Image (tube, coloured by chain):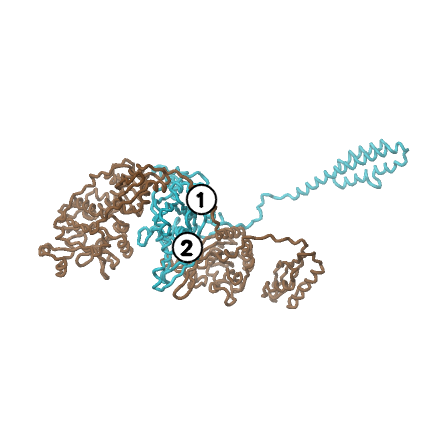
């Protein structure tokens, strides 16, 4: 909000230069974002705190704040106003508030005989400086007093309000003959009726609804209360008699109306933060004084509808508590003085406790802590000396999930993967690109764009995309990340769940690679990571095994013959696979991309912290190799099972060291697998003879399956 | 005989040290010590023809000479071996300036790195690290933090809401699982869901389950519904801090935060607190850090124009965090006994610290996935 340095000086005789004043306010009250020199004045751009709008959104409010923080006295004389009696206004105008909660106070003042003209130069200049356009002396005066007091004000043309010629109304209000002669008119603060419309001062027509508060005459809305005036009831060059309005509307009603209509004005901004009802009559008198001075005319009297006067509240202020919360021994006298300077009435209950009466304009001060803040900021936060908290430091609690994640990050980056972050949003287009259904996606109510329509369900897609994009600059890309997956979990039609889980994703691509190598590289990385976490019992299962893995629908993005689910026991913990070429094509990637996703929460439960030392065998190990030619599509695991079954307990370890096929073999649907076999006994040295016998058994069992053992 | 021996000794002493290589040395060894025709061998063989007394002295003399020659050969041999080895090694010279074999090295995201540092600093001060869900209920994100519905303070947080068509939602305590339904009767106990706009809901969740003393930090991703630019993004990262005990004060906050910034930026820094407003703290303040680039000297007069520090925009201060003393309404919301505890809370932007630490100009780089950016860390 903008404030004029010169204007502020009219209320308080402070000595600070504009820059010094800005610094003082920044440190004690609220941030002054900029000071700008304009035509012999300085424009202070103040980031008013939202809870200080009620008291500080006018120049007088800021001036009072400067007086409090700078230890000055406000020039009370400048704030004096004339008195306005009720006069005959009541006979000219009837003010009604339909629902007390909507409007705490409505002050109206009628002036007859005004002359509408241009505003004087000094006022035009000041309004312009503060960003308001000059319109005419009446409207400008209302804006000027709003900038001065913070109270939004409005001017109606009395002649344009509808006459009360309805017989029922006359009876209802017991209107006398005299009043009829005086053409009684009505102002009602009420909710708009369905279907009502108003042409506002901005020349736009707005459709109104019962959520919106209006100021109406006996027939139609004349203004959108607290938001914008109506064109028809506004001031024109012919205006002679005016009704001034200084009202106090319900913040929630104004906020609601402003949101529905999409209009934010200086007035609505102030009202929705709540202003002091006790400000209305002061602002009205200031406005009347100014208008009578600028446009002539005569007051016909003031009407003040204020059924429930807001009284100042009192709060206890414990000096010991204030010192304890601030952490500094501040003398009692300081508290007394500073609270008084802020316009509070302070009584001393006893040596340790004050009773503070809070002026109604300080709507932000509700509890004792609010008062402590007031005193604290006036004392100066920079004067509080830093003290480390007392007490023993209890060692912090370990967080096993975070520990696990950090370990994973270290291992993955050690394996050459670079960590990347991704947006947690996705849209229909991206889902289509990956052939993903939106069925289980969590939808946002107010996306910023089509790309943020859903929360991300499968982070893997983001990493696949990032990897492909990086191929423009790199030949080989290895990315990983830990991201959140959000998905719906249907319980019943009536009830459904939302599941938020962390997933580890790794994705690799390399230009010119067939994809086969990438798959095994990634698989090796996953095995390495899991092994480092103490997990070795995971298995890779076929993706399209019917009934296994609940997550089948996401699998369309994978190569049908190069993907697997990763399982531990019956539980699926993740998926690995090459991305289907059709998907990659949509991303304009020619290289193959392989990716894996692992559910972090599942891992947390499986991780073994403690590893135990295993006795190293005292007896020598004998190593033999076996190579076997098998059908191309036979799983290595099947061969291994045969070997291990035949090998018996002396066969302690097997290790595939060669997986080979050349074009010829591929053509004949063959491949060659070669294993190192390790034999060991826990209680004696194995002899060659013993091992030979086992090897013979292994070879026989391989050969009975028609697999050629290379000799 | 004696003269002959002398002659041999002289020859050996002259010739052996001069041997050019192992072959000549072998020849010399044979010449003097050879079993068949070696000079000394011949002498020794000839001893038996001498008279007994002479035989003894000559024998001793010859044996001594043998020792001398052997020693000479041995010495020379070692010398030659060394030279040979040297020349082999010399041939094995390699170019130390040729690049090493490239090892693929991954790296951690800069925000991860900064987050770890922050966690380490606070853990060393006894804080525990906790996390919370990113999809939150309106109650945890706003109401419990003293930001009631229809309060204009809610405008301070532009919020992504989840679609309500599927019904209102209910959070199952602590499991990260949220249940929703469309049944009208359920409405009263069900909440609107949103993407958390700050990490502050984690405070609430933690306080509901723990009694003071509390020392936690809660790092994590947060979301804001807003237009993106170089310093704003729809998702970013925060660390929330909370310290609750019997007598925690603003003075304590200043000390803890000062320690944090000193360790984070590894230099002497100053902080200043400015009054501010966050509904869940009272008193509330904004924390400024003396500019880590110009050391707080950027406060050049405005007239200086372009000359000042661009990082702090010549103010000497950097806005770093929002903080304050936990509001009694918040204690009330989590069910604490009023007046039994006091403490501070703060929230600091991880992106902002990261951008400052590594001089990163655009926040959107963090989610770009661009290796040219990520590889630098």
Q: Residues within 10 Å of mark 2 (few under 14, many from 20)?
A: many
Q: Is residue B190 above or below residue A236?
A: below
Q: Secondary structure at mark 2?
A: loop
Q: Residue A380, image x and y in percent?
A: 34, 39
Answer with the quarter of the image where residue A186 lies. Answer: bottom left
Which disc number belongs to residue A571?
none
In the image shown, does B76 or A553 lie closer to the viewer? A553
Label 1 and label 2: CA atoms lie apart by 26 Å
Reading the image, the residue beneath label 1 is: B357
How many numbered discs sit on the rendered protein?
2
A257 sits left or right of B222 in the view: left
Chain A display color: brown
Residue at 45% from the left image edge and 48% from the top image edge: B128
Q: Residue A106, image x and y in percent?
A: 20, 51
Chain B display color: cyan
In the image shown, does A323 or A495 lie closer to the viewer? A323
The answer, for residue A68, to whether it is visible in the render is yes
Which disc number belongs to residue B134?
2
In the image shown, does A262 or A593 lie closer to the viewer? A262
In the image shown, does A338 or A161 lie closer to the viewer? A338
Tags 1 and 2 on a common chain? yes
Q: Earlier in the sequence, mark 1 or mark 2?
A: 2
Q: Chain of mark 1?
A: B
The N terminus of chain A: image quadrant: top left
């Amino acid at each position: 909000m903008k404030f004029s340095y010169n204007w502020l000086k009219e209320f308080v005789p402070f000595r600070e230069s504009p820059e010094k004043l800005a610094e003082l306010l920044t440190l004690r009250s609220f941030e002054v974002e900029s000071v700008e020199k304009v035509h012999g004045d300085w424009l202070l751009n103040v980031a008013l705190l939202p809870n200080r709008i009620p008291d500080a959104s006018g120049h007088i409010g800021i001036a009072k704040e400067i007086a409090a923080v700078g230890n000055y006295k406000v020039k009370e004389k400048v704030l004096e106003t004339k008195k306005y009696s009720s006069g005959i206004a009541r006979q000219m105008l009837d003010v009604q508030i339909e629902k007390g909660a909507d409007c705490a106070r409505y002050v109206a003042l009628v002036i007859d005989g005004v002359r509408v003209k241009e505003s004087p130069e000094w006022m035009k200049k000041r309004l312009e400086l503060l960003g308001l356009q000059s319109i005419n002396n009446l409207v400008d005066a209302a804006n000027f007093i709003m900038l001065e007091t913070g109270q939004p004000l409005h001017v109606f043309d009395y002649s344009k309000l509808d006459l009360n010629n309805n017989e029922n109304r006359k009876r209802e209000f017991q209107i006398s003959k005299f009043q009829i002669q005086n053409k009684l008119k009505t102002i009602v603060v009420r909710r708009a009726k369905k279907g009502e419309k108003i042409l506002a001062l901005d020349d736009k027509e707005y459709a109104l609804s019962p959520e919106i508060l209006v100021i109406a005459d006996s027939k139609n809305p004349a203004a959108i209360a607290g938001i914008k005036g109506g064109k028809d009831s506004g001031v024109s060059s012919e205006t002679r008699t005016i009704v001034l309005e200084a009202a106090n509307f319900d913040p929630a009603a104004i906020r609601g109306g402003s949101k529905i209509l999409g209009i934010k004005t200086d007035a609505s901004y102030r009202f929705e933060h709540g202003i002091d009802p006790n400000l209305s009559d002061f602002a009205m008198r200031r406005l009347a004084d100014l208008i009578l001075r600028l446009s002539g005319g005569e007051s016909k009297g003031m009407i003040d509808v204020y059924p429930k006067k807001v009284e100042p509240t009192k709060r206890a202020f414990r000096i010991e508590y204030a010192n304890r919360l601030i952490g500094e021994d501040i003398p009692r006298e300081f508290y007394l003085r500073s609270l008084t300077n802020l316009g509070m009435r302070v009584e001393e209950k006893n040596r340790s406790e004050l009773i503070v009466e809070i002026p109604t304009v300080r709507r932000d001060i509700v509890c004792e802590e609010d008062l402590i803040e007031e005193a604290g900021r006036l004392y100066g936060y920079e004067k509080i000396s830093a003290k480390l908290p007392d007490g023993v430091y209890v060692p912090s609690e370990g967080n096993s999930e975070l520990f696990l994640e950090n370990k994973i990050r270290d291992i993955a980056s050690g394996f050459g993967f670079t960590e990347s972050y991704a947006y947690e949003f996705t849209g229909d287009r991206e889902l289509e690109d990956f052939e993903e259904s939106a069925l289980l996606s969590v939808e946002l109510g107010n996306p910023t764009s089509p790309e943020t329509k859903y929360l991300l369900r499968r982070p893997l897609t983001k990493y696949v995309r990032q990897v492909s994009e990086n191929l423009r600059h790199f030949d080989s890309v290895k990315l990983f990340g830990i991201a959140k997956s959000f998905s719906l979990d249907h319980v019943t039609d009536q009830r459904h769940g939302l599941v938020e889980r962390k997933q580890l994703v790794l994705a690799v691509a390399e230009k010119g690679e067939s994809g086969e190598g990438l798959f095994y590289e990634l698989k090796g990385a996953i095995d390495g990571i899991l092994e480092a976490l103490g997990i070795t019992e995971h298995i890779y299962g076929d993706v399209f095994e019917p009934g296994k893995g609940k997550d089948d629908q996401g699998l369309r993005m994978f190569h049908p013959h190069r993907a697997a689910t990763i399982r531990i026991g019956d539980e699926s913990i993740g998926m690995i696979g090459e991305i289907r070429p059709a998907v990659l094509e949509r991303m304009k990637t020619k290289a193959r991309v392989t990716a894996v996703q692992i559910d972090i929460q599942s891992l947390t439960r499986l991780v073994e912290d403690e590893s135990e030392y295993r006795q190293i065998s005292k007896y020598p190990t004998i190593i033999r190799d076996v190579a076997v030619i098998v059908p191309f599509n036979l799983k290595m695991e099947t061969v291994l099972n045969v070997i291990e079954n035949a090998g018996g307990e002396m066969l302690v370890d097997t290790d595939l060291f060669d997986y080979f096929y050349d074009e010829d073999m591929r053509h004949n649907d063959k491949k060659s697998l070669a294993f190192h076999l390790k034999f060991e006994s826990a209680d004696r040295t194995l002899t060659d003879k013993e091992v030979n016998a086992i090897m013979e058994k292994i070879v026989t069992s391989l050969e009975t399956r028609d697999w050629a053992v290379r000799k | 005989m004696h003269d002959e021996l002398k002659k041999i000794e002289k020859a050996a002493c002259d010739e052996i040290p001069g041997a050019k290589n192992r072959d000549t040395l072998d020849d010399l060894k044979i010449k003097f010590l050879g079993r068949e025709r070696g000079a000394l061998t011949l002498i020794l063989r000839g001893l038996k023809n001498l008279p007994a007394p002479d035989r003894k002295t000559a024998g001793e003399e010859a044996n001594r000479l043998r020792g001398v020659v052997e020693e000479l050969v041995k010495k020379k041999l070692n010398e030659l071996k060394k030279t040979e080895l040297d020349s082999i090694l010399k041939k094995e010279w390699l170019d130390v300036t040729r690049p090493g074999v490239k090892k693929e090295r991954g790296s951690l995201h800069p925000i991860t790195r900064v987050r770890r540092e922050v966690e380490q600093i606070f853990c060393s001060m006894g804080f525990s690290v906790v996390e919370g869900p990113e999809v939150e209920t309106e109650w945890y994100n706003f109401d419990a933090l003293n930001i009631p519905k229809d309060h204009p303070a809610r405008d301070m947080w532009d919020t992504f809401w989840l679609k309500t068509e599927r019904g209102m939602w209910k959070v199952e305590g602590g499991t990260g699982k949220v249940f929703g339904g469309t049944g009208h009767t359920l409405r009263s106990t069900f909440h609107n869901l949103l993407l958390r706009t700050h990490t502050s809901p984690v405070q609430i969740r933690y306080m509901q389950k723990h009694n003071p003393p509390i020392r936690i930090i809660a790092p994590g991703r947060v979301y804001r519904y807003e237009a993106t630019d170089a310093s704003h993004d729809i998702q970013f990262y925060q660390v929330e801090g909370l310290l609750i005990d019997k007598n925690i004060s603003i003075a304590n906050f200043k000390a803890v935060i000062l320690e944090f910034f000193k360790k984070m930026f590894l230099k002497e820094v100053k902080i200043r607190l400015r009054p501010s407003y966050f509904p869940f703290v009272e008193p509330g303040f904004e924390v400024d850090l003396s500019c880590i680039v110009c050391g707080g000297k950027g406060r050049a007069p405005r007239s200086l124009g372009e000359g000042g520090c661009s990082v702090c925009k010549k103010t000497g201060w950097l806005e770093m965090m929002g903080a304050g003393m936990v509001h009694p309404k918040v204690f009330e919301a989590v069910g604490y006994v009023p007046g039994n505890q006091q403490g501070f809370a703060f929230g600091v932007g991880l992106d902002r610290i990261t951008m400052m630490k590594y001089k990163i100009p655009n926040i959107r780089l963090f989610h770009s996935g661009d290796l040219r950016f990520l590889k630098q860390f």
